[in-house]
Image (cartoon, rainbow, N blue to C red):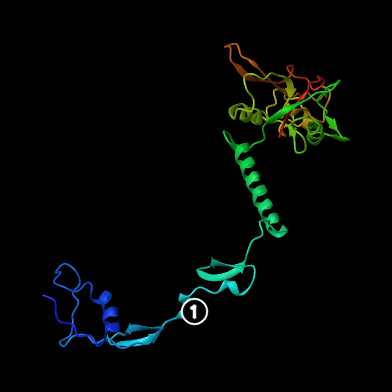
Amino acid sequence: MRRTIFLTSLKTALLAVPLLAGCGNNSTGSMVVVPPGGITLPECLDGQLIAVDGQRNMSCTQALTAGLAPPDCGASAGLVLNAYDGKLECMPKGNGSTNTGLRTVIDKVVSDTNTIEQTINSIKGGGASAKYCGQYTAAQNPNGAISGNGVTGAAGAANLCAQVQGCGAGAHMCTVYEMYESVAAGHITAAMNIGQSWVHMSSWQHNRTAGATPNNGLNDNCGGWTYPTGDLQWYGTTVEWKAAQTGPKALHFASGPGVVACSQRFPIACCL
């Protein structure tokens, strides 16, 4: 049964409707307790709201009109209403173009995104090691002393690989492991053919005890690609990508004394 509510005016009656909408005999919800004699709502002026304090006393309080009413953007030409950081503000209207500073920021974001995508694609399907990019070949291919741009050794080989179309700056002679990664990652496919080429290898094998500095990893890479003859009993390592005896293509690595002499001349397998 609803209790009688005494109201002081029509205005307060209209304000009381939402306050009393939930009152009744609903035993499943929160109970609204109406004091004996009814509720008397204060008479508030225009622009005021009814406030209830911690002791449930009601009073009139001034509404925060600045926070409730949007700003007047028509007062100045070229301004439109916009929401920024949770506030309504008047902001300059766009003209359909992008200023230079914003365009620079957007271009940098696009460039950074492309760089990330290229990095992901370069390591997809394999490790982050360099991959085969081509062969350095010349009218006279290099022997075990590889020189490029006046430098002899691994750096000389890198200078020559940088000249290969499809390789460029940063390219170098492939290692045997980079050739494996190139096959595993799909950079070298069954449709390709790679003739016998120099590759870098350091296995610390010294099949001839008379070989110079046998424990320094120079035996199977022609002394770090600085040696063109045979008196030191060093040798080189080469790679081929061709069919195995079983039919499918496989990497063929040749190395060892009497197998790949440093005096022989081969292209260079280049990786980037």
Name which residue lies at 84% across and 23% down: 138
Residue at the far left in the pictured view? 1
The image shows residue 182, relative to residue 65, as above or below, that is above
Name which residue lies at 72% across and 58% down: 100
Picture quadrant where residue 99 is located: bottom right
Residue 262 screen position, x and y as percent: 80, 22
Given residues 34 and 168, the one toward you in this image is 34
| Quadrant of image for the C terminus | top right
Residue 130 screen position, x and y as percent: 67, 35
| Quadrant of image for the N terminus | bottom left
Name which residue lies at 13% across and 71% down: 25
The image shows residue 260, relative to residue 122, as above or below, that is above
Q: In the rendered view, does 16 fall on the left or right side of 208?
A: left
Residue 70 screen position, x and y as percent: 50, 73
Picture quadrant where residue 132 is located: top right
Which residue in the protein does label 1 denote? 66
Name which residue lies at 26% across and 81% down: 13
Given residues 201 and 168, the one toward you in this image is 168
Q: In the rendered view, does 28 fall on the left or right side of 191?
A: left
The image shows residue 146, relative to residue 240, as above or below, that is below
Local packing at callout 1 (Cα closer than 10 Å; few below 14, some 14-19, many 20+) is few
Q: In the rendered view, does 185 fall on the left or right side of 136?
A: left
Q: Label 1's element?
A: helix
Residue 261 visible, this orientation? yes
Given residues 272 and 260, the one toward you in this image is 272
Residue 184 screen position, x and y as percent: 58, 28
Amino acid type, residue under disc 1 in the picture: Ala
Q: In the rendered view, does 80 fall on the left or right side of 1?
A: right
Residue 201 visible, this orientation? no
How many numbered callouts? 1
Residue at the far front in the pictured view? 10
